[in-house]
Image (cartoon, rainbow, N blue to C red):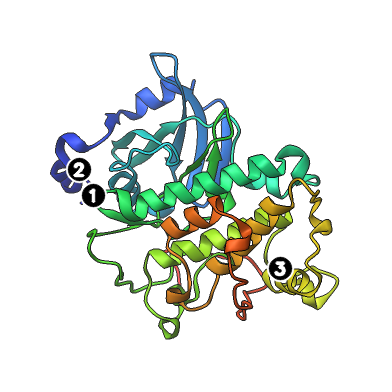
Amino acid sequence: MIEDFLNDYGSLAPKRYKYSELKKMTKSFKEKLGKGGYGSVFKGTLQDGRSVAVKILSKSTENGAEFINEVASIGRTSHVNVVSLLGFCLDGHKRALVYEFMPNGSLDKYIYSDEPKASLPWDRLYQIAVGIARGLEYLHRGCNTRIVHFDIKPHNILLDQDFCPKISDFGLAKLCPPKESILSMADARGTIGYIAPEVFSRTFGMASTKSDVYSYGMMVLEMVGGRRNVNAWADRTSEIYFPHWVYEHLDRDGSLEAYDVTAETEEIARRMIMVGLWCIQTMPPSRPSMSRVVEMLEGRVGDMEMPPRPYLSSPQRPVVVTSSSS
């Protein structure tokens, strides 16, 4: 199935590597960068001296669906805020993906640190939020084939040497023709805590690009608060679901002192909170498009209306839901 797909893809496919070439470029997988349900990532070096990240897919993805998704979707992209797929390996049962190397790792390690604003100050955090929004706007509107990512979260945002953000991990992505906005889906996909309501229950509507908008909003609120949105171990019940807490806090006294905000950075923080709250509205039509999100982030806070209070809570334990699990 994979071979047929790649034959159809023809000259548009990224470079194909043998497994022996991957062993050579990673020095027999000497330096591990990370590990997840998909497999492990190792640092490598191409012949021209460029550093790369080599993702070796685990045997749990034997049907090849996520592998095809990744090659098919990210192989069609070219944007400063989307990670570049440089090649792939399909050698017997061995499957791997070769990406440009991101020296500053993923966003989650900064925003969940003990002092998140020390490692990523407000101005840089804001630029990262804008960059991710532009990347998603491109996926939703700038490609020949519209791409809905379905797994936007801090772990899947990589940072280059200048902290420019790049969207990565397209294993759960769905492709649809540019003129269509609604996706037909038979299963839920994404990570609990970031999944839009309509993705796990059609009662709220149909999955679409607005599903990525919801995930983006949850992530922006985490960036502001320096904490996970779902905190099942919070001392006070009101703090378990962070969007409720931040909305009530902002609406009640308008103070942002709890987020290490100064007079100089207050507008940035308030703008990010307002955008995040608009993005996580329960019903998809109430959420802005990613193009509108970019406009809101780059505009003035005074021009934005206070969004309605978010009224959905999220499961208390973060659980990954993929296209192959129930």
Question: Could you tell me residue 267's position as x and y percent?
Answer: 69, 53
Residue 224, placed above or below residue 203 = above
* Numbered marks: total: 3
Query: Which residue is at a point 57% across and 27% down the rendered structure image?
Result: 161
Q: Residue furthest bottom?
A: 203
Q: Is residue 272 left or right of residue 130?
A: right
Crowdedness of circle 1 by 10 Å Cα count: few (<14), some, many (20+)? few
Crowdedness of circle 3 by 10 Å Cα count: few (<14), some, many (20+)? many
Q: Secondary structure at mark 1?
A: loop
Q: CA distance from mark 2 to mark 1?
A: 18 Å
Q: Which residue is mark 2?
A: 6
Question: Could you tell me residue 284's position as x and y percent?
Answer: 44, 74
Amino acid type shown at disc 2: Leu
Query: Which quadrant would the C terminus be assigned to in this image?
Result: bottom left
Query: Which residue is at a point 80% across and 47% down the rendered structure image?
Result: 114
Query: Which residue is at a point 62% across and 64% down the rendered structure image?
Result: 274
Rendered image: mark on residue 144:
1
In depth, the one of 226 and 128 nearer the eye is 128
Rendered image: mark on residue 81:
none
Q: Which residue is mark 3?
A: 242
